[in-house]
Image (cartoon, rainbow, N blue to C red):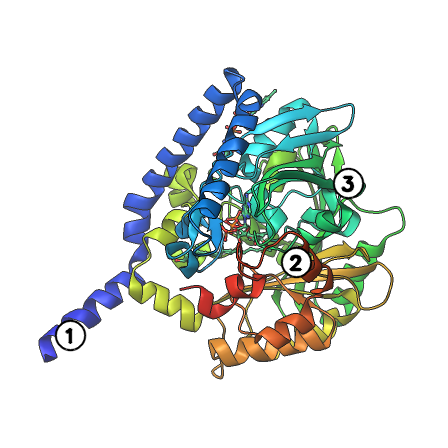
Amino acid sequence: MGISNLINGVIEHIVIHYRWVLVCFFLLPASFVYDIYTYIRTWIVFHMASAPKLHDKKVKDVQRQVKEWIREGKKVPMCTARPGWQVMSFRIPKYKDTFFNVKVNLVDILEIDVHRQVVKIEPLATMGQLTATLEPLGWSIPVLPELDDLTVGGLVMGTGIETSSHKYGLFQHICVSYELVLADGQVVTCSKDQNPDLFYAVPWSYGTLGFLTAVEIKIVPANRFVKLEYFPVHSMEHAVETFQKQTMKEDGNQFVEAVMFNRDQWVVMVGNMVTSAEPGKLNRIGLWHKPWFFKHIESFLRSGNGLEYIPLRDYYHRHSRSIFWEIQDIIPFGNNVIFRYLFGWMIPPKVSLLKLTQPAAVKKLYETQHMVQDMLVPLTKLKDSIECFDRETKIYPVWLCPFRLPNDPGFLHPDGNQEEMYVDIGLYGVPKVPTFNAEATTRRIEKFVRDNCGFQMLYADTYMTREEFKKMFDHQLYDKMRTKYQCSEAFPEVYDKVNRTARS
Ligand SMILES: Cc1cc2nc3c(=O)[nH]c(=O)nc-3n(C[C@H](O)[C@H](O)[C@H](O)COP(=O)(O)OP(=O)(O)OC[C@H]3O[C@@H](n4cnc5c(N)ncnc54)[C@H](O)[C@@H]3O)c2cc1C
Ligand SMILES: NC(=O)C1=CN([C@@H]2O[C@H](COP(=O)(O)OP(=O)(O)OC[C@H]3O[C@@H](n4cnc5c(N)ncnc54)[C@H](OP(=O)(O)O)[C@@H]3O)[C@@H](O)[C@H]2O)C=CC1
Ligand SMILES: CC(C)=CCC[C@@H](C)[C@H]1CC[C@H]2C3=C(CC[C@]12C)[C@@]1(C)CC[C@H](O)C[C@@H]1CC3
């Protein structure tokens, strides 16, 4: 007994402290091969131009599966068949094992209509795929969430945010129309003019109103570079003021974000697209040997204000290589210059593969001593929120990204009756307060956010009760649509998919 405990302890120590061995020798090559596979597949699909032709056939297959569920007596609710390990969150949804799994394998970009300025995309197309497609054509989508593997479907049914959100809103606010297969198997299209109630109820519905089969998203002209200015600030009061000023600026910055390295050490960044770069100021931050972007940002705290030109796609995916700053816990020496030159081209390991291969000891460690949360609060509450999160977690760096929240119908709208500026506060990392307890701390933070008219992003762990959840999110329109489209047997409620006990 004593020996087996000792052996288990040693194994656990190795698994936790030397995870990089598995990651470097197996996951990085596997991620690389997987990327090449996706790249070749996409290339073939595009060059055979088969994607648009096959769309209707693929939608019919989704309808066929829903009708099969009806024929079989609607025994259990439905969900997509996308495996839980591929989902961009800490957790694996438990319901995937028991629900009726519907395969929605629609992975292509269908049409780029430059006259209407929209791109029509299938739900499993990823952000990496979209930037790779649109950029060479001189287009982009106005809000491009940065992790390459985020899917269009997940961002519509969940939510998406980027540094241009203070201008354009969340991912849902750049969507023009959705095509869905409903619980009775019929296909509907909804937009602001056609079935508007359904259109406003779809975002944040987490696949509980129907299966998404295509989305039309606005496109905007894209320039080659982002002129990025860095403003290091050394006091919280001044930093909050700078961040608010840059967000609300009259003539408008195209991109605004800030990274806090501790309560009083911030770097506020503002960017604008430009067609050319000043000589000597071009920085291709996406190259394999470049320092992790958050480390690069931190260097401005020492060197003072900065200005550089970054290729557009490198800017969009600037946090991808270091998975924000999560990679430092996985490959602690990964930012070492020798490692970067030798192996940087294989970085990052795929989030899905990290999830799939994480040993039980690592999972437990992340559950109890790690936090991944995005809290959306009114910009006017930024200082109070930071003080609360600092008191509760002392997690740094912290990501700050402002966004415009229009007063549209649906799951979330501002407290007053008019549009309001909000800010996403992203906490990713190891809490440094001795009192941290995953459930109790998160519940206190959730209460603070609710009391301040804020929202929690639901890819993260939510510990709220159903009543608290309904207080945070306005269910009126959602409930109406669930009744109208007979969803009660077909899909669970959002809460039943996202609460902590629904995910393992
Ligand atoms: C005119 C045009 C039309 C196109 N139409 C379609 C279409 O109808 N359907 C379609 O699916 N594609 C379409 N594409 C996409 C095309 O196949 C992409 O350009 C290709 O995926 C890679 O482009 P790249 O060489 O710029 O990628 P790179 O810049 O070499 O890619 C680098 C990184 O981008 C990310 N990435 C690239 N492709 C993907 C992907 N498929 N999935 C996930 N991440 C990826 C990965 O992180 C990858 O490591 C179109 C492209 C063009 C130019
Ligand atoms: N910058 C950003 O904005 C970031 C956002 N995120 C979050 O990540 C999540 C997206 O991750 P991703 O892995 O792409 O998506 P997921 O697979 O996590 O999907 C999210 C939800 O959308 C539903 N869904 C997805 N596709 C369809 C479809 N075709 N029809 C019906 N329902 C669908 C899923 O339903 P089901 O459960 O049935 O599969 C699931 O409930 C979002 O919640 C987003 O907020 C994460 C990191 C960064
Ligand atoms: C920008 C916004 C709104 C959110 C960013 C969230 C991400 C930083 C996290 C979403 C899923 C997270 C996972 C991990 C790191 C942080 C995220 C990418 C891991 C890779 C950490 C290591 C674990 O072993 C697996 C995790 C899977 C999910």
24 on left or right of 218: left
Find out whether the residues at labels 3 and 1 contact each other: C-beta distance under 8 Å. no
Residue 6 badge: 1
- CA gap between label 3 and label 2 equals 19 Å
Q: Nearer the viewer, residue 84 or 200?
A: 200
Q: Quadrant of residue 244?
A: bottom right
Amino acid bearing label 2: Thr
User: Of label 3 and label 1, which has the lower sequence position?
Assistant: 1
User: Of label 3 and label 2, which has the lower sequence position?
Assistant: 3
Q: Nearer the viewer, mark 2 or mark 1?
A: 2
Amino acid bearing label 1: Leu
- CA gap between label 2 and label 1 equals 57 Å
Where disc 1 sits, the SS reads: helix
At 48% from the left and 26% from the top, the residue drawn is: 42
Q: Which residue is mark 2?
A: 483
| Residue 395 locus on image (x, y percent) | 54, 69
Vertical comparison of 304 with 117: above or below? below
Residue 194 badge: 3
